[in-house]
Image (spheres, grey):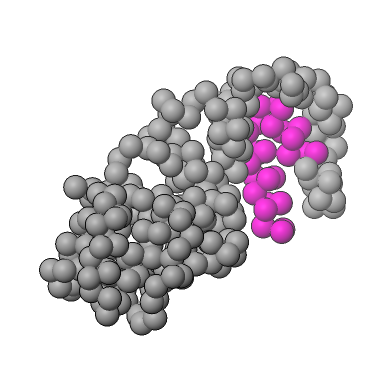
Amino acid sequence: MAKSSALSTQLSLEESAWELFETGAYEEVSKLAEKNAKNVFLNHLRAVCEFETETNTANNFPLEGKTVLTPLLGAYLHKAKGNSKEAAVLFHEYFKASSSPVSYSILTTGIKACEEVGAHKACADLIQRYKALWSDGYFAKLEFFSLYHLRKFEEALKTFKENSESLKEDRDVLAALGLCFVHIGKFEEACNILEKLPGAGEIPSYEDKVTEYSDRIKSIPKYEARKKELSRTELLDLGYAYLFSESYKKAEEVFTSLVFQE
């Protein structure tokens, strides 16, 4: 049987239907709903089965009433109508409630719906619930990028370390990983990663950047002499001059000051 939250408040009929649903026995769920036509929970669960199998017949039977599945059913209805953002909101609402019953199929559908609209917070939240039940790393890349876009760089680094075997060859992940190190002020680590990206020949190497910034590196004393008067552009130049002259601590101080100016 697939893992799920227990339906402790449901009657045995509902529990039986949920167990059938978890195992993918959707036809059996439909039969139970047909035999118990006034059972709102079974009607809602039957509709979810129809949406999961994409048969587009979910509206052909009663959907009125309210159950624990109401937000989930609403999410599927919006998804079927192409209202992707509304669907993502309702999937998030449903799964953030710890009492909501969970199965592999509906949770993965919810995560993918949130990914589709770039709902990074919802993705991160739903993936945490997924990881509490399944430890297969299926959503490792999505979790990494969700945390990155949420600017939770330390957590993104932790996710990468936990899933390095599956992520270490992904160029996009490595590029974002390098930027994570930049954002937390670890510029040397950032340079080491960005230099070694697959296809790194397409971007300037560290040595190229040193050459590019050579004049500004030579001008560091002049920048420092009038540091309080520097424009934002000049501060950026100074920060990169420090970075590419391996004065990482000073580079961090400059970039941090720029962040607080935003």
Q: Magenta part mainly helix, strand or loop?
A: helix
Q: If the image is split into quadrants, where does the C terminus sit? A: bottom right
- Percent across and percent down for residue 59 are 46, 70
- Percent across and percent down for residue 90 are 47, 68
- Percent across and percent down for residue 48 are 38, 62
Q: Does the image show residue 8?
A: no
Q: Does the image show residue 236?
A: yes
Residue stretch rendered in magenta on the structure:
237-262
Q: Residue furthest left?
A: 12
Residue in view at x 32 percent, y 65 percent: 45
* Observer-nearest of 159 and 53: 53
Residue 211, quarter of picture: top right
Image-based side of 121 in relation to 61, left or right: right
The verdict on residue 206 being magenta is no
Task: State how many labels appear.
Answer: 0
Q: Is residue 165 above or below residue 138?
A: above
Image-based side of 191 in relation to 202, left or right: left
Residue in view at x 66 percent, y 27 percent: 246
Residue 67, quarter of picture: bottom left
* Observer-nearest of 131 and 11: 11
The verdict on residue 256 being magenta is yes
Q: Residue furthest bottom?
A: 65
Residue in view at x 20 percent, y 56 percent: 19
* Observer-nearest of 209 and 245: 209
Residue in view at x 19 percent, y 47 percent: 1
